[in-house]
Amino acid sequence: MLTISLTTLLLLPLTFGAPLTAPVYLAPIKRSEALNARAVADNAYIIAIKDNTVDPANRGAWVNKIMTNAGVTLSDDETNSLRLGWNETIMNGIAGTFSAKAFNVIRSQSEVAYVEPDYEMRISETVQQDNAPWGISRLSTGPVSLQGQDPLGLQFPYFSDSTAGAGTDVYILDTGIRTTHTEFGGRATFLQTFGPGVPGQDVNGHGTHVAGTAAGNRVGVAKQASIFMIKCVADDGSAATSDIVSAINLAATRAAANPTRPAVVNMSLGGPPSRALDAAVSAAVAGGLPFVVAAGNETQDANNSSPARLPEVITVGATDINDRIASFSNFGNKVDVFAPGDTIISASFQGDNLGAVLSGTSMASPHIAGLAALVMGQSGKLTPDALATQIKSIAVNNAISGVPGNTANVLAFNNAVPVDQLQQALASLGQTGAGTVASSTAAAAAATTSAAAAGDAVQDANTGNGGRRGRNRNRAVEAEAFPLD
């Protein structure tokens, strides 16, 4: 103890006698909170100058002086990049591209309030498509109903932001995809196949149809989003839970490797309650990856289905063109939002320019996955909870007839244009019967002929699967394909 005390005493004079150095001032770098913010160049900055410190008429002389004092010479490119003439009442500062040395010199000046990367901004405008299927059209007409129209037509208007989901990734866990289809324009990638079935191909049609609705050029919601297909559903439409978990693992791993890029997972599948499947989805969501899930087609409470019963996913029920809950759609307090899912036209697996009609909550879910891509394409990456909140906050309430009392009456809407523009567009296309939700939902039109009518060959039932296999959430075998152009 004595030795330790003596050593401490001997060190004290050395500690207190050390010379003190004044800290060097460095102006703060103000970076955007948006995860997808990108500067025009890595070394491009805006320099905010404190008021009454630098003569606005002599900013160039100030730059020359501080660089000379620091022994730094600006290159010709740096000199030519300088923006020095801003009116101080608009922006008291300068901008340019700077080497690391020059940048540090600027940051160390007491006259500098802060520096900010010269962020890239993009124009954003609403675009109108006049040859869309009713499903994506209804997503953009919100308070204006399409009741009484022919769901098999391709004459509907679709409004969306011009960014169209660019810079976002949509992971689809399904039966595969026809990547060469003209709807995808080179934006679709077949990642991997888990389980039985023809590897790297869609010979069922469900996955191609789902992908087309999420991000097809004509029939899709987010027309510039990137599509990543992970085949985990066999060619007969069934899937082992272990194969689905493998697909979830791959999607989550890829998304985590690029944490600033917005991504969403679409699962147009499900089955009986499964702790293992729920745990995998929950873990991926907790890691920051949003999941959009079909509610199921058993006309029962979605609480009876995995992963639709999870509160952290966006569970989607289905509606028809008359704004009624689809006859097959699941319901209950786990359903977050409804979207078109009855008689939906999308891409066919049978040819590169062919379309097909399917019905089911499988078809409703990709409308919301596409909407998620649209939202994050504009706002940047969002947490799963923030994304769900945003989608529900812009939706239309109490627009759907036939919704059980324990189910949120929420119809998805992208909120792209005002009501008067919607009504004008529908009238110009000859859809004079379209009215606002308030009037049209009061008297629902007669039932439309559905590709999911009773007796169709494929019923999305979970019985007989021994609790081990899920199924796609569509109700009809794909009908004969037809040209989309």
Image (cartoon, helix red, strand yellow):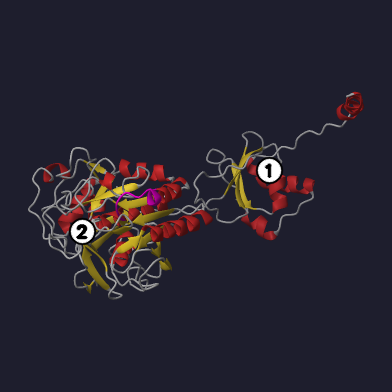
**Location of residue 88 in the rendering, given as x and y in whole percent from the top left corner:** 57, 39
Residue visible at 29% across and 43% down in the picture:
334
Residue visible at 40% across and 72% down in the picture:
200
Between 368 and 379, the one nearer to me in the picture: 368
Q: Residue furthest bottom?
A: 351
How many callouts does the rendering have? 2
Magenta part of the chain: 270-278
Whether the magenta-drawn stretch holds residue 107 is answered as no
- In this rendering, position of residue 110 left or right of residue 201: right
Between 29 and 294, the one nearer to me in the picture: 294
Circle 2 or circle 1, nearest the eye: 2
Identify whether 244 is placed above or below 24: below
Whether residues under marks 2 and 1 lie with C-beta atoms below 8 angstroms apart, the answer is no
**Location of residue 102 in the rendering, given as x and y in whole percent from the top left corner:** 71, 50
Answer yes or no: is residue 158 visible.
Answer: no
- In this rendering, position of residue 478 left or right of residue 63: left
Task: Point out which mark residue 107 bears.
Answer: 1
> Amino acid type of disc 1?
Arg
**Location of residue 159 in the rendering, given as x and y in whole percent from the top left corner:** 28, 55
Position of the C terminus, as image quadrant, is bottom left
Identify whether 164 is placed above or below 6: below
Q: Quadrant of residue 81?
A: bottom right
Q: Quadrant of residue 361?
A: bottom left
The alpha-carbon separation of the residues under discs 2 and 1 comes to 55 Å
Between 116 and 303, the one nearer to me in the picture: 303
